[in-house]
Image (cartoon, rainbow, N blue to C red):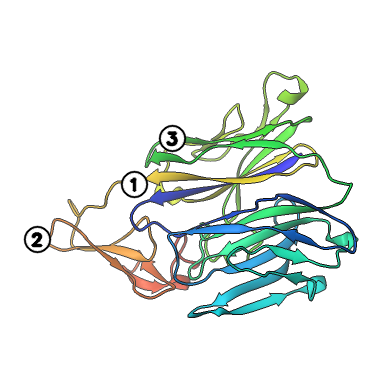
């Protein structure tokens, strides 16, 4: 039994980074060889972007590494009646996305090799951080050969003050064998669009409680401020803006898979120029914004970088292209 739970950790403010959230209303679809199937996908982008996102479907495994791209499409900025689309490999001519606003994919002429897990991926336009690219999966199975599903409960949306502690719930109901809980932080690892962030293993634990043992056996209780609780939740101590990102819980306990996401918000203190020298300061909540402190003005000036694809460079204190800026705002190594 195996599932992946995605969580988003972000900073809250009037100019928060773009957050993409993908959902799959039907996480499992049955079909027959020679027939067709529709894999549904929906998404939400906050705050709303003026540029259309890029949509992609991947065929892959349970943890989305080593996936194969089968479709990419997007509307043309400034002329949304025009589209750019491509299909790939064995799926050329067999896949169709009718509506890029609700990018369900239809697979026709289904082959036995098509029964697999498919990832719907939505990427914001511009500087694509791990928050700006999300993915959820749909399992395509052969009619009459469907595996049993598991029941998952996840944390609802939470708020935590900067410097506070928080737990991200990861629970598997119906596990019938020992479960391995792996926690990761980072971007959708199958997407070449992500320009910042890495997919990093941060904690793991083996839970044999379902076999009648009273306590879980730890194989790796996390790194730094991360740890795994006895109930297999990920505990973050002293949350900071630098911890912003996407968190994944992967549970292995048989053949069933489920995927869900939740949002964890970190509240940061309001920026003030009190005690600061005149100059420019990064906005910890939005890479494309910065603050300016000027003598005689008690309140900071909050300014945008002005051009899409540019972010504030905290090393040189000016707006720059993302490839010249290090993570988390840019891609410079």
Q: Is residue 237 left or right of residue 86?
A: left
Q: Position of residue 96 (x, y in %)?
A: 72, 71
Q: Position of residue 176 (x, y in %)?
A: 78, 30
Helix, strand or loop for disc 3: loop
Q: Quadrant of residue 150?
A: top right
Residue at left 64%, top 64%?
A: 103
Q: Quadrant of residue 215?
A: top right
Residue at which label 1 appears: 268
User: What number is the disc on residue 24?
Assistant: none
In space, the residues marked 3 and 1 are separated at their CA atoms by 14 Å
- Residue 165: assigned label: 3
Within 10 angstroms of label 3, few (less than 14), some, or many (20 or more) residues? some
Q: Sequence-wise, which precedes: disc 1 or disc 2?
A: 1
Q: Is residue 227 above or below residue 131?
A: above
Residue at screen point 52% across, 62% down: 196
- Mark 2 or mark 3: name the one nearer the start of the chain: 3
Residue furthest left as drawn: 296
Pick the front one: 275 or 115 = 115
Cβ atoms at labels 2 and 3 below 8 Å apart: no
**Measuring 87% from the left and 51% from the top, which residue is drawn there?**
143
Q: Secondary structure at mark 1?
A: loop
Relative to 61, is 80 above or below?
below
Q: Which residue lies under the disc numbered 2?
A: 296
Q: CA distance from mark 2 to mark 3?
A: 37 Å
C-alpha gap between disc 1 and disc 2: 25 Å
Q: Position of residue 255 (x, y in %)?
A: 80, 42
Q: Does residue 201 lie above or below 106 as drawn?
A: above
Please report the residue visible at 70 percent of the width from the left and 55 percent of the height from the top: 64
Lateral position of residue 100 relative to residue 141, left or right: left
């Amino acid at each position: 039994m195996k599932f992946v739970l995605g969580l988003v950790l972000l900073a809250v403010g009037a100019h928060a980074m773009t957050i993409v959230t993908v959902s799959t209303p039907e996480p499992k679809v049955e079909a027959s060889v020679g027939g067709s199937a529709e894999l549904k996908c929906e998404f939400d982008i906050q705050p709303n972007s003026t540029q259309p996102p890029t949509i992609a479907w991947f065929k892959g495994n349970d943890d989305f590494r080593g996936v194969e791209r089968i479709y990419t499409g997007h509307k043309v900025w400034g002329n949304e009646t025009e589209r750019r689309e491509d299909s790939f490999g064995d799926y050329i001519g067999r896949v169709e996305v009718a509506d890029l606003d609700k990018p369900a994919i239809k697979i026709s002429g289904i082959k036995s090799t098509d029964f697999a897990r498919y990832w719907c991926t939505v990427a914001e336009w511009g500087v694509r951080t791990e928050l700006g690219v999300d993915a959820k999966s749909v399992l395509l199975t052969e009619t009459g050969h469907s595996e049993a599903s598991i029941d998952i409960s996840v944390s609802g949306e939470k708020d935590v003050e900067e410097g506070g502690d928080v737990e991200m719930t990861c629970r598997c109901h119906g596990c019938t064998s020992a479960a391995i809980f792996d926690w990761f932080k980072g971007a959708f690892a199958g997407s070449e669009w992500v320009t910042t962030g890495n997919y990093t293993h941060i904690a793991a634990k083996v839970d044999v409680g379902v076999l009648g043992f009273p306590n879980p056996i730890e194989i790796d209780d996390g790194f730094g401020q991360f740890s795994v609780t006895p109930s297999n939740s990920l505990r973050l101590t002293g949350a900071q803006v630098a911890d912003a990102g996407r968190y994944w819980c992967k549970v292995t306990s048989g053949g069933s898979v489920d995927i869900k996401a939740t949002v964890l918000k970190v509240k940061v203190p309001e920026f003030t120029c009190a005690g600061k020298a005149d100059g420019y300061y990064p906005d910890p909540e939005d890479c494309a914004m910065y603050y300016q402190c000027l003598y005689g003005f008690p309140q900071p000036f909050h300014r945008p970088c002005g051009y899409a694809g540019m972010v504030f460079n905290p090393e040189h204190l000016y707006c720059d292209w993302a490839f010249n800026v290090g993570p988390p705002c840019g891609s410079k190594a």
